[in-house]
């Protein structure tokens, strides 16, 4: 229940009978959708959230694999909009696990009385803009319909699981699991022969836990991953007290960080290329000891200068060679691409797992997977037998959740046509030809390239202000102009070109999905610059937007 100090929503309630009086339909009840609902209700709007799954929580409902947890410290990866909430909530671990994050999402839904506005088990099939009435018409897969002035797509950057089109997959006679659609009942791997395909963040989290249970584990790796230790553990009570004594200050300082977190650790005053080998290694050692993403924040030039990056990359490779006893396995685990180019993994015992006698690594860049067979898979000249296949094969990131909806703007233009060559948008928030549609933490904004909690709060606050401004000015619609959109995408690309981020095949680029256009999708300009740009656009009367 809301406390006395939490902002209170409007008492105007949408009912089934009043669906044509809705102001906003929010799609998705993950962290973005929950905050959008709360904030927009508090400004007096009538809002309904449509959620495909039977629960709130989004990412933290779907990704229930063993070891799933956040990679940013819990007290930073959490809502800041309500001080009573952040003071009351106690995080058990430094990096919250999936069950704890799901409990948090449910707590927020209850505390702010959100549930009566959320329709679960409601997958949006289509959303069409009705030009005559200047409203969106939304239909669910089971045939229910809504209309609203605004639509907010809170459908997540990573909510469309990717299953590669392996030949023979349906012929496999054992159990197939996907990390992003994990069963609700615990899976017992005891006595099983397990294969994991993929070595991205989810795989790095789950491999040590499966290895500890299974009879054998074979990991099929296409690209080796850089992983830094989480040093996870119970959250120190003294640390919690310090954070809560100045939570607002910490949040404000984090919002000044490019990544939206980590303000407690300043980078070295000099670039990595300007210090001695000993000084650089001492700094990397310190960050390795602290754990998490702090390694990438050690020097300001790690993501912009390949020479600097190579120092950090080689530091991690040395660690891998120290940890993994078998030299050929260690060599196969050493990545060759720049560190941070693909999302850095944060681990608990990942490399050490390869010292276990029941774990085998297969490098599928040398021995490609030809087919899944009834009893395993064929890769290179070998066949592998197992009874459980775990697909840790990631997501159709950023655009996948959107292009899976029949979304149609002005003049019958579909999102699939509009984004055929890549995700066109302005500020990541608005798409020319799709009036009164706001997209949260998707392509074109800092999104999953930063602390998503910080990004989503900024987006939602900006949208609430924008709607209030439209109403105050007597306007009906707002949408990006085609010119502003073109300039923005040129800018997003130009920013990526000034970094090391185009020098590998990452999901930021869509490279994990066959046929997807290669476009660097998130904005790599840092959160503060992005937020300032959005604020300036608003201050200048929503420059670059068409209002009617
Ligand atoms: C395993 C994993 C670890 C992560 N770790 C971090 C981290 O450490 N730090 C970080 O900042 N971010 C992390 N992320 C990114 C994470 O997605 C965001 O932090 C955040 O949870 C996104 O919230 P969201 O509400 O925007 O999207 P989501 O949580 O993805 O929620 C979107 C919701 O929309 C629903 N939906 C989608 N399409 C439809 C439709 N057509 N109709 C109805 N409902 C629909 C989905 O069912 C889902 O519930 C991680 C992601 C994953 C997958």
Image (spheres, helix red, strand yellow):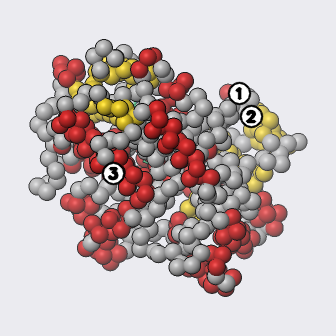
Quadrant of the image occupied by residue 372: top right
Question: Which element type, helix, strand or loop, lies under badge 2?
Answer: strand
Question: Which element type, helix, strand or loop, lies under badge 1?
Answer: helix
Check disc 3 and report the residue beneath it: 535
Foreground residue, 16 or 107? 16
Check disc 2 and report the residue beneath it: 372
Q: Earlier in the sequence, mark 3 or mark 2?
A: 2
Quick one: label 3, few (<14), some, or many (20+) residues within 10 Å? some
Q: Earlier in the sequence, mark 1 or mark 2?
A: 1
Q: Of the residues tagged 3 and 2, which is closer to the observer?
A: 3
Locate residue 396 relative to residue 243 in the image: left or right. right
Quadrant of the image occupied by residue 151: top left
Q: Where 241 sits versus 43, above or below?
A: below
Check disc 1 and report the residue beneath it: 171
Q: Of the residues tagged 1 and 3, which is closer to the observer?
A: 3
- Residue at image x 37%, y 20%? 129
Quick one: label 1, few (<14), some, or many (20+) residues within 10 Å? few
Q: Position of residue 201 (x, y in %)?
A: 58, 53
Q: Position of residue 420 (x, y in %)?
A: 58, 28
Locate residue 340 relative to residue 403 in the image: left or right. right
Q: Where 72 sits versus 40, above or below?
A: below
- Residue at image x 57%, y 78%? 270
Does label 2 point to a residue whose CB lies under 8 Å from ligand 1?
A: no
Mark-to-mark CA distance, 3 and 2: 51 Å
Q: Earlier in the sequence, mark 1 or mark 3?
A: 1
Q: Is residue 68 visible?
A: no
Quick one: label 2, few (<14), some, or many (20+) residues within 10 Å? many
């Amino acid at each position: 229940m809301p406390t006395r100090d939490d902002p209170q929503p409007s008492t105007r309630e949408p009912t089934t009978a009043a669906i044509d009086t809705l102001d906003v339909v929010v799609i998705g009840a993950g962290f973005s959708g929950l905050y959008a609902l709360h904030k927009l209700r508090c400004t007096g709007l009538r809002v309904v959230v449509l959620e495909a799954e039977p629960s709130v929580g989004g990412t933290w409902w779907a990704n229930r694999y063993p070891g799933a947890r956040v990679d940013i410290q819990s007290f930073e990866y959490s809502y800041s909009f309500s001080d009573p909430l952040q003071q009351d909530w106690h995080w058990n671990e430094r990096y919250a696990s999936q069950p704890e994050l799901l409990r948090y999402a449910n707590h927020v839904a209850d505390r702010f009385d959100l549930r009566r506005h959320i329709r679960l088990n409601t997958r949006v099939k289509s959303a069409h803009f009705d030009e005559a009435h200047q409203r969106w018409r939304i239909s669910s897969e089971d045939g229910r319909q809504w209309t609203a002035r605004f639509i907010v797509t809170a459908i997540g950057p990573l909510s469309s699981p990717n299953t590669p089109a392996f030949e023979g997959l349906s012929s496999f006679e054992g159990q197939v699991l996907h990390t992003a659609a994990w069963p609700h009942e615990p899976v017992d791997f005891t006595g099983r022969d397990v294969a994991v395909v993929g070595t991205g963040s989810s795989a790095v989290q789950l491999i040590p836990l499966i290895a500890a249970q299974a009879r054998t584990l074979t990991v099929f790796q296409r690209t080796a991953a850089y992983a830094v230790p989480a040093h996870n553990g119970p959250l120190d009570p003294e640390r919690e007290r310090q954070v809560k004594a100045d939570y607002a200050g910490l949040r404000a300082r984090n919002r000044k960080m490019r990544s939206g977190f980590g303000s407690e650790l300043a980078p070295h005053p000099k670039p990595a290329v300007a210090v001695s080998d000993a000084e650089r290694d001492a700094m990397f050692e310190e960050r390795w000891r602290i754990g998490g993403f702090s390694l990438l924040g050690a020097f300001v030039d790690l993501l912009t200068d390949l020479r600097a990056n190579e120092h950090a990359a080689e530091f991690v490779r040395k660690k891998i060679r120290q940890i993994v006893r078998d030299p050929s396995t260690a060599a196969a685990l050493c990545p060759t691409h720049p560190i941070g180019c693909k999302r850095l993994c944060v681990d608990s015992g990942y490399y050490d797992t390869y010292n276990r006698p029941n774990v085998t690594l297969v490098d599928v860049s040398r021995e490609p997977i030809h087919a899944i067979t009834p009893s395993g898979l064929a890769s290179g000249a070998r066949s592998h037998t197992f009874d459980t296949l775990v697909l840790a094969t990631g997501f159709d990131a950023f655009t996948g959740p959107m292009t899976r909806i029949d979304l149609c703007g002005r003049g019958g233009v579909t999102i699939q046509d509009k984004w055929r060559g890549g995700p066109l948008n302005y500020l990541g928030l608005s798409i020319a030809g799709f009036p009164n549609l706001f997209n949260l933490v998707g392509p074109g904004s800092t999104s999953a390239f930063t602390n998503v909690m910080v990004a989503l709060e900024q987006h939602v606050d900006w949208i609430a202000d924008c709607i209030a401004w439209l109403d105050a000015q007597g306007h009906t619609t707002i949408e990006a102009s085609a010119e502003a959109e073109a300039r923005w995408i040129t800018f997003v690309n130009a920013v990526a070109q000034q970094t090391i981020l185009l020098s590998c095949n990452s999901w930021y680029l869509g490279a994990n999905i066959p046929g997807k256009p290669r476009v660097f999708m998130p904005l790599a300009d840092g959160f503060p610059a992005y937020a300032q740009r959005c604020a300036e656009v608003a201050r200048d009367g929503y420059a670059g937007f068409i209002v009617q």
